[in-house]
Protein backbone atom coordinates (compact mmCIF):
# COMPACT_ATOMS: atom_id res chain seq x y z
CA UNK A 1 0.00 0.00 0.00
CA UNK A 2 1.72 3.19 -1.21
CA UNK A 3 -0.63 5.67 0.46
CA UNK A 4 0.28 6.65 4.02
CA UNK A 5 -2.90 6.71 6.14
CA UNK A 6 -1.17 8.72 8.88
CA UNK A 7 -0.53 5.87 11.33
CA UNK A 8 1.00 2.39 11.17
CA UNK A 9 -1.68 0.08 9.75
CA UNK A 10 -1.42 -2.30 6.81
CA UNK A 11 -4.14 -4.30 5.04
CA UNK A 12 -3.79 -8.05 4.59
CA UNK A 13 -5.42 -9.98 1.77
CA UNK A 14 -5.12 -13.69 2.62
CA UNK A 15 -7.17 -13.51 4.73
CA UNK A 16 -8.64 -10.03 4.49
CA UNK A 17 -7.81 -7.93 7.51
CA UNK A 18 -5.27 -5.55 9.01
CA UNK A 19 -1.92 -5.60 10.77
CA UNK A 20 -1.34 -2.96 13.44
CA UNK A 21 2.06 -1.42 14.12
CA UNK A 22 3.64 -0.61 17.44
CA UNK A 23 1.52 1.71 19.64
CA UNK A 24 -1.48 1.30 17.33
CA UNK A 25 -4.77 -0.04 18.68
CA UNK A 26 -7.34 -1.99 16.71
CA UNK A 27 -9.80 -4.88 17.07
CA UNK A 28 -10.03 -8.26 15.42
CA UNK A 29 -11.74 -7.63 12.09
CA UNK A 30 -15.42 -8.30 11.51
CA UNK A 31 -16.09 -10.03 8.19
CA UNK A 32 -19.07 -9.49 5.90
CA UNK A 33 -19.89 -12.64 3.96
CA UNK A 34 -21.49 -12.89 0.55
CA UNK A 35 -24.43 -14.71 2.11
CA UNK A 36 -25.01 -11.75 4.46
CA UNK A 37 -25.47 -9.23 1.63
CA UNK A 38 -27.21 -11.31 -1.06
CA UNK A 39 -30.65 -9.70 -0.58
CA UNK A 40 -29.33 -6.33 -1.78
CA UNK A 41 -27.50 -7.58 -4.87
CA UNK A 42 -28.82 -7.43 -8.41
CA UNK A 43 -28.36 -11.21 -8.65
CA UNK A 44 -28.96 -12.60 -5.14
CA UNK A 45 -27.89 -16.13 -6.16
CA UNK A 46 -24.60 -15.00 -7.73
CA UNK A 47 -21.14 -16.41 -7.08
CA UNK A 48 -18.35 -14.31 -5.60
CA UNK A 49 -15.80 -14.14 -2.78
CA UNK A 50 -17.04 -15.84 0.40
CA UNK A 51 -15.76 -12.87 2.43
CA UNK A 52 -16.67 -9.65 0.64
CA UNK A 53 -14.99 -7.21 3.05
CA UNK A 54 -13.41 -6.95 6.49
CA UNK A 55 -14.00 -4.09 8.92
CA UNK A 56 -11.82 -2.84 11.78
CA UNK A 57 -13.89 -0.29 13.67
CA UNK A 58 -11.95 1.93 16.09
CA UNK A 59 -8.30 2.03 15.04
CA UNK A 60 -5.54 4.60 15.56
CA UNK A 61 -2.53 5.58 17.61
CA UNK A 62 -2.68 4.86 21.33
CA UNK A 63 -1.84 8.51 22.05
CA UNK A 64 -4.90 9.71 20.11
CA UNK A 65 -7.58 7.44 21.56
CA UNK A 66 -8.61 9.73 24.41
CA UNK A 67 -9.06 12.66 22.01
CA UNK A 68 -11.33 10.46 19.88
CA UNK A 69 -13.39 9.31 22.84
CA UNK A 70 -13.82 12.86 24.18
CA UNK A 71 -15.22 13.94 20.79
CA UNK A 72 -17.28 10.77 20.28
CA UNK A 73 -15.31 10.02 17.10
CA UNK A 74 -14.24 6.67 15.75
CA UNK A 75 -11.85 5.88 12.91
CA UNK A 76 -12.59 2.73 10.96
CA UNK A 77 -10.67 0.82 8.32
CA UNK A 78 -12.17 -1.48 5.70
CA UNK A 79 -10.59 -3.71 3.07
CA UNK A 80 -12.52 -5.35 0.22
CA UNK A 81 -11.98 -8.44 -1.88
CA UNK A 82 -11.31 -7.90 -5.56
CA UNK A 83 -13.43 -9.49 -8.25
CA UNK A 84 -17.15 -9.63 -8.92
CA UNK A 85 -20.50 -10.58 -7.44
CA UNK A 86 -22.14 -11.97 -10.54
CA UNK A 87 -22.35 -9.10 -13.03
CA UNK A 88 -21.58 -6.53 -10.34
CA UNK A 89 -18.19 -5.55 -8.95
CA UNK A 90 -17.57 -6.44 -5.32
CA UNK A 91 -19.49 -3.94 -3.18
CA UNK A 92 -21.27 -3.37 0.10
CA UNK A 93 -25.00 -3.92 0.41
CA UNK A 94 -25.92 -0.30 1.16
CA UNK A 95 -27.36 1.28 4.31
CA UNK A 96 -28.33 4.50 6.04
CA UNK A 97 -26.63 5.60 9.24
CA UNK A 98 -29.10 5.04 12.04
CA UNK A 99 -29.96 7.85 14.45
CA UNK A 100 -27.15 8.06 17.01
CA UNK A 101 -28.34 8.41 20.61
CA UNK A 102 -25.56 10.91 21.36
CA UNK A 103 -26.72 13.54 18.86
CA UNK A 104 -30.29 12.48 18.09
CA UNK A 105 -29.85 12.28 14.34
CA UNK A 106 -28.25 10.32 11.52
CA UNK A 107 -24.57 11.11 11.08
CA UNK A 108 -22.21 11.61 8.16
CA UNK A 109 -19.09 9.67 7.16
CA UNK A 110 -15.76 10.94 5.83
CA UNK A 111 -14.04 8.43 3.53
CA UNK A 112 -10.40 8.39 2.45
CA UNK A 113 -9.22 5.85 -0.12
CA UNK A 114 -5.91 4.14 0.73
CA UNK A 115 -5.48 1.61 -2.10
CA UNK A 116 -7.39 0.40 -5.13
CA UNK A 117 -10.23 2.49 -6.53
CA UNK A 118 -13.81 3.03 -5.41
CA UNK A 119 -17.13 4.41 -6.38
CA UNK A 120 -18.67 5.89 -3.25
CA UNK A 121 -22.34 5.67 -4.21
CA UNK A 122 -24.99 7.70 -2.39
CA UNK A 123 -28.65 8.68 -2.76
CA UNK A 124 -30.68 11.17 -0.72
CA UNK A 125 -33.23 8.63 0.53
CA UNK A 126 -34.10 4.95 0.27
CA UNK A 127 -37.78 5.75 -0.24
CA UNK A 128 -39.58 5.04 -3.52
CA UNK A 129 -38.05 8.14 -5.08
CA UNK A 130 -34.36 8.14 -4.11
CA UNK A 131 -33.80 11.84 -4.77
CA UNK A 132 -30.43 12.88 -6.09
CA UNK A 133 -28.01 10.03 -6.75
CA UNK A 134 -24.22 10.28 -7.03
CA UNK A 135 -21.37 7.87 -7.73
CA UNK A 136 -18.06 9.49 -6.80
CA UNK A 137 -15.00 7.86 -8.37
CA UNK A 138 -12.18 7.96 -5.83
CA UNK A 139 -8.51 6.91 -5.94
CA UNK A 140 -5.83 6.73 -3.21
CA UNK A 141 -5.72 10.01 -1.29
CA UNK A 142 -9.19 11.11 -2.40
CA UNK A 143 -11.71 12.14 0.27
CA UNK A 144 -15.49 11.73 -0.05
CA UNK A 145 -18.15 12.81 2.45
CA UNK A 146 -21.54 11.07 2.70
CA UNK A 147 -24.12 13.35 4.39
CA UNK A 148 -26.38 12.36 7.30
CA UNK A 149 -29.44 10.34 6.34
CA UNK A 150 -28.29 9.37 2.86
CA UNK A 151 -28.29 5.75 1.71
CA UNK A 152 -24.85 4.76 0.48
CA UNK A 153 -22.69 1.86 -0.66
CA UNK A 154 -19.02 1.27 -1.40
CA UNK A 155 -18.15 -0.22 -4.78
CA UNK A 156 -14.83 -1.68 -5.96
CA UNK A 157 -14.11 0.37 -9.10
CA UNK A 158 -11.10 -1.69 -10.22
CA UNK A 159 -11.97 -5.37 -9.88
CA UNK A 160 -8.33 -6.39 -10.37
CA UNK A 161 -7.32 -4.76 -7.06
CA UNK A 162 -8.35 -4.95 -3.44
CA UNK A 163 -9.92 -1.74 -2.13
CA UNK A 164 -8.91 -0.33 1.25
CA UNK A 165 -10.09 2.87 2.91
CA UNK A 166 -10.33 4.66 6.24
CA UNK A 167 -13.29 6.69 7.51
CA UNK A 168 -14.29 8.99 10.35
CA UNK A 169 -17.58 7.99 12.01
CA UNK A 170 -19.48 8.61 15.22
CA UNK A 171 -18.61 6.20 18.05
CA UNK A 172 -22.20 5.15 18.76
CA UNK A 173 -22.78 4.27 15.13
CA UNK A 174 -25.57 2.06 13.83
CA UNK A 175 -26.71 0.88 10.41
CA UNK A 176 -30.28 0.89 9.08
CA UNK A 177 -30.81 -1.58 6.24
CA UNK A 178 -34.60 -1.79 6.19
CA UNK A 179 -35.54 0.65 3.43
CA UNK A 180 -32.68 -0.41 1.17
CA UNK A 181 -33.64 -4.06 1.57
CA UNK A 182 -37.30 -3.22 0.94
CA UNK A 183 -36.22 -1.92 -2.48
CA UNK A 184 -33.90 -4.91 -3.07
CA UNK A 185 -30.82 -2.69 -3.06
CA UNK A 186 -29.77 0.86 -3.86
CA UNK A 187 -31.32 2.79 -6.75
CA UNK A 188 -28.46 2.14 -9.20
CA UNK A 189 -26.63 -1.15 -9.64
CA UNK A 190 -22.98 -1.11 -10.81
CA UNK A 191 -22.25 -3.46 -13.69
CA UNK A 192 -18.86 -4.67 -14.92
CA UNK A 193 -18.65 -3.94 -18.64
CA UNK A 194 -15.24 -5.09 -19.92
CA UNK A 195 -12.77 -2.60 -18.39
CA UNK A 196 -15.28 -0.14 -16.97
CA UNK A 197 -18.14 0.10 -14.52
CA UNK A 198 -21.56 1.11 -15.82
CA UNK A 199 -24.70 1.72 -13.76
CA UNK A 200 -28.23 0.51 -14.39
CA UNK A 201 -31.41 1.59 -12.61
CA UNK A 202 -33.03 -0.59 -9.96
CA UNK A 203 -36.63 -1.15 -11.10
CA UNK A 204 -37.93 -1.10 -7.53
CA UNK A 205 -37.41 2.68 -7.34
CA UNK A 206 -39.08 5.48 -9.24
CA UNK A 207 -37.09 6.98 -12.10
CA UNK A 208 -34.03 8.98 -11.04
CA UNK A 209 -30.84 10.43 -12.49
CA UNK A 210 -27.36 9.30 -11.53
CA UNK A 211 -24.48 11.78 -11.54
CA UNK A 212 -21.05 10.16 -11.87
CA UNK A 213 -18.35 12.57 -10.77
CA UNK A 214 -14.85 13.09 -9.43
CA UNK A 215 -14.23 13.97 -5.76
CA UNK A 216 -14.02 17.59 -4.74
CA UNK A 217 -12.14 19.46 -2.03
CA UNK A 218 -14.31 20.14 1.04
CA UNK A 219 -13.02 23.60 1.82
CA UNK A 220 -16.17 24.50 3.75
CA UNK A 221 -15.22 21.84 6.33
CA UNK A 222 -11.59 22.94 6.52
CA UNK A 223 -10.39 19.61 5.08
CA UNK A 224 -7.15 19.77 3.10
CA UNK A 225 -6.29 17.61 0.12
CA UNK A 226 -3.01 15.68 0.15
CA UNK A 227 -2.85 15.26 3.95
CA UNK A 228 -4.26 12.06 5.49
CA UNK A 229 -7.50 12.77 7.32
CA UNK A 230 -6.12 10.94 10.37
CA UNK A 231 -3.14 13.31 10.45
CA UNK A 232 -5.49 16.27 10.05
CA UNK A 233 -7.32 15.07 13.19
CA UNK A 234 -4.04 14.77 15.10
CA UNK A 235 -3.18 18.35 14.16
CA UNK A 236 -6.68 19.64 15.00
CA UNK A 237 -8.79 17.20 17.05
CA UNK A 238 -11.89 19.39 16.68
CA UNK A 239 -11.79 19.37 12.85
CA UNK A 240 -14.18 16.42 12.50
CA UNK A 241 -16.64 17.38 15.22
CA UNK A 242 -19.24 17.75 12.44
CA UNK A 243 -19.14 13.94 12.15
CA UNK A 244 -20.27 13.25 15.72
CA UNK A 245 -22.30 16.48 15.90
CA UNK A 246 -23.75 16.86 12.38
CA UNK A 247 -26.05 19.66 13.55
CA UNK A 248 -22.95 21.89 13.61
CA UNK A 249 -22.93 21.72 9.81
CA UNK A 250 -26.70 21.97 9.28
CA UNK A 251 -26.46 24.60 6.55
CA UNK A 252 -23.73 22.66 4.75
CA UNK A 253 -25.95 19.57 4.39
CA UNK A 254 -28.64 21.50 2.54
CA UNK A 255 -28.35 20.84 -1.22
CA UNK A 256 -25.07 19.02 -0.50
CA UNK A 257 -22.99 17.92 -3.48
CA UNK A 258 -20.31 15.30 -2.71
Image (cartoon, grey):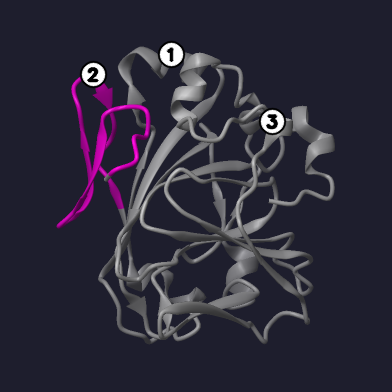
Residue indicated by mark 3: 221
Q: Residue at x 35, y 12 (%)?
A: 63
- Of circles 3 and 1, the one toward us is 3
In the rendered view, tell whether residue 72 sits above or below residue 213.
Answer: above
Is disc 2 placed on a helix, strand or loop? Answer: loop
Which callout, 2 or 1, points at the residue further toward the start of the chain? Answer: 2
**Residue 183, quarter of picture:** bottom right
Measured in 3D between alpha carbons, the distance from the residue under mark 3 to the one under mark 1, in whole angstroms, is: 23 Å
Residue 54 located left or right of residue 12: right
Q: Quadrant of residue 181?
A: bottom right
As measured in the structure, the alpha-carbon distance from the residue carrying label 2 to the one carrying label 1 is 14 Å
Q: Position of residue 209 (x, y in %)?
A: 75, 75
Whether 156 is among the magenta residues is no
Front label number (2 vs 3): 3
- Quick one: 251 or 28, which is closer to the camera? 251
Give the mark nearer the N terminus: 2 vs 3: 2
Q: Is residue 17 magenta?
A: yes
Q: Which residues are magenta?
A: 2-30
In the image, what residue occupies the spot 42% across and 70% down?
A: 37
Which residue is tagged 1?
Answer: 66
Amino acid sequence: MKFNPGFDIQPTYQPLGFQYGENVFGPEVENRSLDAIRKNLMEPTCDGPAVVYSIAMDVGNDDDKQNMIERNLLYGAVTYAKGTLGKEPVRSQGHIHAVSPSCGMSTCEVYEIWSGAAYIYMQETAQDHPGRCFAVYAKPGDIVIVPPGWAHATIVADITQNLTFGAWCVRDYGFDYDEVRAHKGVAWFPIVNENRIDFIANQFYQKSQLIVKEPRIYEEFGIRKGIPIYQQFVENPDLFLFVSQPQLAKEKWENFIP
